[in-house]
Image (cartoon, rainbow, N blue to C red):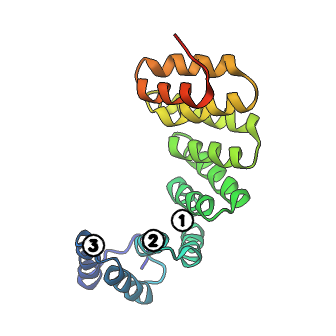
Amino acid sequence: MSSSAKPGFDYRWAKWRAMALLVLGRQQAALEVFNAMQARWPNDAYVLASRAHLLVQTGHTAAALDDSRRLVALRAEHGGTWFNHGYMLEDAGHFEEAEAAFRRATELSPELDRAWYGLGLVLIRLQRYEEAVKALKKNTELQPMSPYGWYQLARVHVDRQQPDEAVKIIRHLKGFEPKVAAQLERETGLLVA
């Protein structure tokens, strides 16, 4: 089914059944519905994305990545698709591939703060701290009130022997996320008044 074709009753019924099974906590039964949907509509983006998500949740990472790769081939110009692919690759430990996927997501959707955050995390894993700082700064520009990017940015500054920069971030976090600021103080030993 192409993304422009209107789905028929069979498609909508299968989609509804899968969602209802997920709400009821019956992941295996929902996966069976998605498998049947994929057999019938092999190039449907919703089916591929939903199946990949469910497969990764149930520990079937290789199969999830296969679906995700097919999905990015079908939706090569969709930033969110690349973000999800990057997340799955990162989770599987494929950091170089995840970096490429997150970079593609940020090229296609520069406002996608989660892609910048994911890129920053992958670059930390690859020990490319200077690049990680740039990605995390972009994340904090897009989501200034979210503590996650700030937290990781402070950790990178500590790892790079830049405690003054980490102190600035802790001070900033105290203004809106005091618990995260306190956690950073405990973890880094940097006490900020």
Q: Nearer the viewer, residue 16 or 126?
A: 126
Badge 2: residue crowd in 10 Å (few <14, some 14–19, many ≥20): many
* Amino acid type, mark 3: Gly
Task: Give the number of the disc on residue 55.
Answer: none
Q: Which residue is mark 2?
A: 45
Badge 1: residue crowd in 10 Å (few <14, some 14–19, many ≥20): some
At x 48%, y 79%, the residue is: 43
In-image side of 24 versus 93 (left or right): left
Q: For mark 1, give the secondary structure.
A: loop
Query: Badges 2 and 3: C-beta atoms under 8 Å apart?
Result: no
Relative height, residue 127 to residue 17 (above, below): above
Q: Which residue is mark 3?
A: 25
Task: Give the number of the disc on residue 75.
Answer: 1
Spatial CA span between label 2 and label 1? 8 Å
Q: Which quarter of the picture shows residue 20?
A: bottom left
Q: For mark 3, give the secondary structure.
A: loop
